[in-house]
Image (cartoon, helix red, strand yellow):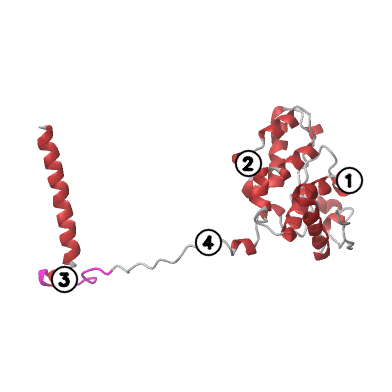
């Protein structure tokens, strides 16, 4: 049985401010990718890669994660941008990279930033939507966000989601794909101490054969000498056979 979304109160965020006026038109204003503006092959490719950056994030946007079938459908106009975003978020690559390593609370944060273009209002909203992940599953949760009234109002069918009105927040593309709880579970590289190299003679110390004989590791020297003689003997044997 699907549980209803728990009630929560929206909090003030930049994206809820109607307009910042002139200050809104600066280098932080996102370029908005719309199908209507993609009138050439290059512009459509730029829109597709913008969608990858938004859903997979900067550090995950690699060619190995491409969804060629979805790209072809979008270029042929058999699906809309909304469906392309939905397909990326439901893809096996996204599930393995993002969904598997994270808790439901963190998945709510990531999904809101990447699919709705804003952070969750509060811990209450994270809890409410984490319950939806538990009851609907990841696929149903993605559908609930992308088919929501909020997504439709901001992005509709043909616009790639973007970070809305970023003024006081850092770019969402800096958000790592997994949290500290998963990072702390990863196997750590053990510390392997190495012996410090000590030269046979100190700086400016005069050379002496007697000191060389006393300080040298003759077991190592003899081992290297035997190995060297063995290599020489091997080359001589090969040369004699070839002759």
Location of mark 4 (residue):
187
Location of mark 2 (residue):
65
Quadrant of the rendering where the N terminus is positioned: bottom right
Distance of label 3 from label 4 (alpha carbons):
49 Å
Q: Magenta stretch: residue 69 in it? A: no
Mark 4 or mark 1: which is in front? Answer: 4
Mark 2 or mark 4: which is in front? Answer: 4
Around disc 2, counting alpha carbons within 10 Å, would you say few (fewer than 14), some (14 to 19), or many (20 or more)? some
| Highlighted range, magenta | 198-210
Would you say residue 57 is visible in this rendering?
A: no
Location of mark 1 (residue):
153
Instruction: Please identify the dominant SS of the magenta region.
Output: loop
Residue 222 in picture, x, y percent from top left: 15, 61
Cβ atoms at labels 3 and 4 below 8 Å apart = no
- 113 vs 237, nearest the viewer: 237
Cβ atoms at labels 3 and 2 below 8 Å apart = no
Mark 1 or mark 3: which is in front? Answer: 1
Mark 3 or mark 2: which is in front? Answer: 2
Location of mark 3 (residue):
206
Would you say residue 142 is visible in this rendering?
A: yes
Q: Quadrant of residue 235?
A: top left
Give the structural element (helix, strand or loop) at label 3. loop
- 145 vs 116, nearest the viewer: 145
Distance of label 4 from label 1 (alpha carbons):
44 Å
From this view, report whether residue 203 is shown above or below residue 131.
below
């Amino acid at each position: 049985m699907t549980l209803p979304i728990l009630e929560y109160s929206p909090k003030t965020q930049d994206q809820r401010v109607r307009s910042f006026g002139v200050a809104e038109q600066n280098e932080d204003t996102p370029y908005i990718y719309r199908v209507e503006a993609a009138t050439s092959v290059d512009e459509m490719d730029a829109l597709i890669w913008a969608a990858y950056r938004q859903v997979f994030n900067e550090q995950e946007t690699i060619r190995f994660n491409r969804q060629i079938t979805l790209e072809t459908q979008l270029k042929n106009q058999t699906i809309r941008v909304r469906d392309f975003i939905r397909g990326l978020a439901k893809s096996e690559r996204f599930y393995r990279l993002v969904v598997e390593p994270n808790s439901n609370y963190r998945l709510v944060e990531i999904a809101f930033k990447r699919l709705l273009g804003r952070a969750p209002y509060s811990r209450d909203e994270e809890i409410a939507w984490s319950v939806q992940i538990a009851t609907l599953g990841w696929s149903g949760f993605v559908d609930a966000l992308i088919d929501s009234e909020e997504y439709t109002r901001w992005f509709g069918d043909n616009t790639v989601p973007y970070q809305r009105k970023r003024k006081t927040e850092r770019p969402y593309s800096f958000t790592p794909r997994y949290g500290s709880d998963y990072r702390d579970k990863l196997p750590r590289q053990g510390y392997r101490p190495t012996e410090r190299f000590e030269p046979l003679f100190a700086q400016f110390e005069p050379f002496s054969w007697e000191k060389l004989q006393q300080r040298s590791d003759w077991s190592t020297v003899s081992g290297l000498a035997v190995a060297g003689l063995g290599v020489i003997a091997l080359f001589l044997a090969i040369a004699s056979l070839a002759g």
